[in-house]
Image (cartoon, rainbow, N blue to C red):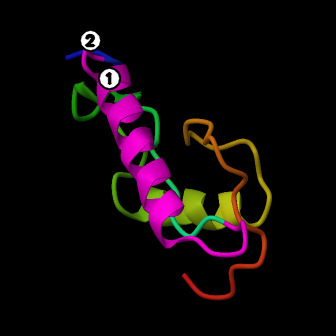
Amino acid sequence: KVEQTENDLDILDYAREKVTALNQHYTQGGNPRFFLLHRKRLYNAQEGRWMGWERKRGKLHELNLLLRGDKDTTYFPSNEEVPTDIKFV
């Protein structure tokens, strides 16, 4: 397969619209409650396909890095700032 399909950006745009709508409906006080986090695909030679790095464990590892302020992850940039006051994942 490929790193990015024709529909990937359309799907992400649609998801961003829905997250924005959720935040407009449910957020009070200006801080968004909902965030879209999506990771880029990397080529996995062992599997012979493009997929998220360390499909399950890597997702959680990178999420923790992102929440601690690390910018060097495979997550796509978000429209919103990632919250810095998360206590539990």
Q: Residue at x 60, y 87 (%)?
A: 88
Q: Is residue 55 left or right of residue 31?
A: left
Q: Is residue 22 left or right of residue 46?
A: right
| Image spot of residue 58 (x, y percent) | 47, 57
Residue 23 belongs to the span the image colors magenta: yes
Q: Could you say which quadrant of the image residue 86 lies in?
A: bottom right
| Alpha carbon distance from label 1 to label 2 | 8 Å
Pointers 1 and 2 in contact (CB under 8 A)? yes
Q: Residue at x 62, y 64 (%)?
A: 32
Please provide percent x and percent y for residue 27: 57, 70
SS for callout 2: loop
First to last magenta residue range: 5-31
The amino acid type found where label 1 is placed reads Asp
The percent coordinates of residue 57 (x first, y second) are 42, 64
The quadrant holding residue 84 is bottom right
Q: Residue 23: x percent and y percent?
A: 51, 61
